[in-house]
Amino acid sequence: MDIAKKKRRIALGCEGSANKLGIGVILHEGDLLSPSTCTSRVLSNVRHTFVSPPGTGFLPKDTAHHHRAFFVRVAKQALVDAGVSVADIDCICYTRGPGMGAPLTSVAVAARTLALLWGKELVGVNHCVGHIEMGRAITGAEHPVVLYVSGGNTQVIAYAEQRYRIFGETLDIAVGNCLDRFARALAISNDPAPGYNIEQLAKQGGRVLLDLPYAVKGMDCSFSGILTRAEELAAQMKVGGKTPEGEPFTAADLCFSLQETVFAMLVEITERAMAHVGSNQVLIVGGVGCNERLQEMMGAMAADRGGSVYATDERFCIDNGIMIAHAGLLAYETGFRTPIEGSSCTQRFRTDEVFVKWRR
């Protein structure tokens, strides 16, 4: 049946660009010829995380092995939770990139296998666009400036002429990578996530604000120098080091200072983008977007401009399969398909490379 004539459309999405394996099922309802009548509903959103020991990161080969080991189990659970059968599914969506090569490949191969076994069409999805579209669907934000912050990406984005245009980004490492690597310096647990554990420690700090490099360059940011200095301070703390004023400081003070500095940088470049495009909405997406302090600081800036901040909870901020299903189904409804022979994945896939045909 022609997809344009179907009133109910269902997609299964597979995400595995980093240490989260996520598979979700989404339902779109309504007449595609009358977009204002169309709605979306999450039917299932199952996730399993590879957690490495404290003081370590997750290696691509270990993460890929985790995804291969758990894919069938997570996929079955997603179908059970959704209450749908294979026959109900219109397409299989998977993360084409960006991300870590080995995990991406593991999930792409699994998605391709499902498409061949079940006789379904395949849709490759840009991971960043998945975050944006899921954030828009959940929050109802219409034309926001998007701050996309995660372990692999840091971008300030706005939509124009069927592209998500990048106004500013990191010049080196992502803000989430900065936080994750700093957690290793303090041997902070990776369960449930290093960034979350830094956030909880930071709530206990604040007595001392340590001086860290503030590196905003136009619309872009740099986090590598901040990380290096924070690691140096962590080493000094362990041997009883003090501030230039002679004050002792704790791991909580370090976490507080790091958050305040990097989040202030993100607020600055986001506000500049808002002024440029004339928007009073900010949508925060990506795993770091769960951070309550970042949301609070962004909210204060937006309120000063008479605007508002939109964010989601950990179900949708952190990498998940449902965002891939949703963005993939939006593309599928416009006629986009990924042929099996072209169903590759790539570690480098910029947000602004995607033609956003489903938006006007």
Image (tube, rainbow, N blue to C red):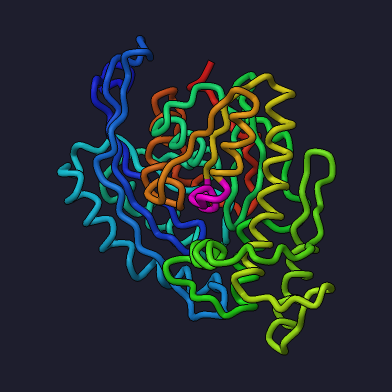
- In depth, the one of 284 and 260 nearer the eye is 260
Q: Position of residue 11 (x, y in %)?
A: 31, 38
Q: Position of residue 128 (x, y in %)?
A: 55, 42
Residue located at (52% from left, 73% from top): 61
| Residue 13 appears left or right of 238 | left
| Residue 301 appears left or right of 119 | right
Quarter of the image with the C terminus is top right
- In depth, the one of 146 and 320 nearer the eye is 146
Q: Position of residue 222 (x, y in %)?
A: 78, 54
- In depth, the one of 261 and 290 nearer the eye is 261
What span is colored magenta in the figure?
Answer: 286-294
Which residue is situated farthest in the bottom direction here? 239
Residue located at (37% from left, 55% from top): 22
Q: Can see residue 55?
A: yes
Residue located at (66% from left, 69% from top): 254
Q: Can see residue 195?
A: no
- In depth, the one of 277 and 296 nearer the eye is 296
Q: Is residue 116 above or below residue 356?
A: below
Q: Is residue 293 magenta?
A: yes
Magenta part, dominant SS:
helix
Number of marks: 0
Residue located at (25% from left, 20% from top): 6
Quarter of the image with the N terminus is top left
Q: Is residue 86 above or below residue 37?
A: below
Quarter of the image for residue 261 reads bottom right
Q: Is residue 175 magenta?
A: no
Q: Is residue 248 above or below residue 63?
A: below
